[in-house]
Amino acid sequence: MATHKRFALSGWERYVITAADGRYMLIVEVSCTGHKETVMIAFADMKKNDVAHAMGFRRRFRHSTILSHVSTEDGYITWANPVLRAAFVVRGNKRHLLFACPSLKLPDGRVGLDVNIILLQGIYEKQNKDMSLRKASSNQRSCWMGTITGMPVSGTLRLGEDMEAFSPDSAWAALDWCRKKGRVRLKKSPVLNATGIHDGAACSISLAMTSRSGSGERHSFISYEGKTYNLSGIIWEAHEYDGLLNAEIHDDAGMLNIRFIPAFSNQTEPSRLFGRVSGRFCPSIGKEIWIESFSGFIEERRITGATTCID
């Protein structure tokens, strides 16, 4: 986008960092909706079955935003308040995330969370155009969405008094972003996100429940070894067990068959239900992918009239 008209921009930038051994998930989100800007950091302890989070809010002016117009542009975001300090820097194929929550009480009782990490985008994310651009709607109100998966993580993580270093094979990150202008409606529909390791490579999953009309449906995909497999006709069979949502998910082509086993939920918006994902995926071309106890969560978020792409 060479030039940008002046309009009220909304959307989000959401990073999910998953430990390769499945111990924890980090969710970092910056969002701009209406007259409010929000930064949220959540640490989900997959062993303690609990989540700790810190949030900050501030009022925005009509056309101001802390977000760039598209996530692929070089730029930075900064945020500071008594609860958390954060900075997000994009330079070329690197995304540098720094944030600190000195008073955050973690699920295991430790206090304080500091992260200084670099996410490296591979060349294939720029070249992968499996999801082509679509016109947003007849009234020209536009919405852009993108996903980047399988980013290796390097840097450091401090939990309480304990420090650990990230290496490219110890954690993987995925980015889900959205930008919208005009009054594009936001509807709720379950979306499953999960990440894990299969044969030494990161595998990312994003599955949205198919709408009855099929219009404005958020795309579903599985990304593995630099290739994205786009899926359609996703079928959810959900039921409650001990008050939590269990889900068996498959597609009408018979390539996908997985199950989500819930463990715990958070108390913030958007609501998230954390758990484990297991099953198998058999693409028509390529080797069979076994999904073995991947860390994941279900949340309710969906934009209608969306133009989707993979960066």
Image: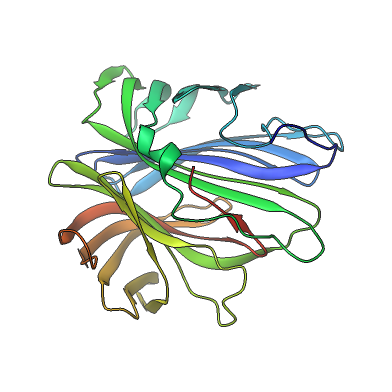
Residue 31, percent from left and from top: 64, 41
Picture quarter containing residue 3?
A: top right
- In the rendered picture of this protein, how many numbered marks are placed on residues? 0
Q: Nearer the viewer, residue 299 or 196?
A: 196
Please give left or right for residue 302 compared with residue 23 in the image.
right
Q: Is residue 291 visible?
A: yes
- Residue depicted at x 47% and y 71%: 209
Q: Is residue 296 above or below residue 119?
A: below
Residue placed at 33% from the left, 73% from the top? 249
Question: In which quadrant is the N terminus drawn?
Answer: top right
- State the colouring used for the structure image: rainbow
In the rendered image, residue 193, in percent from the top left (x then y), is placed at: 39, 55
**Residue ID at (65%, 65%):** 304
Residue 55 lies, with reference to residue 295, above or below; the image says: above
Residue 163 location (% of width, % of height): 28, 17
Q: Position of residue 125 (x, y in %)?
A: 41, 39
Determine the image quadrant of residue 248.
Answer: bottom left
Position of residue 149 in the picture relative to residue 79 (left or right): left
Q: Is residue 26 positioned above or below 288 on the image?
A: above
Residue 43 seen in this snapshot: no
Image point 19% across, 59% down: which residue?
A: 286
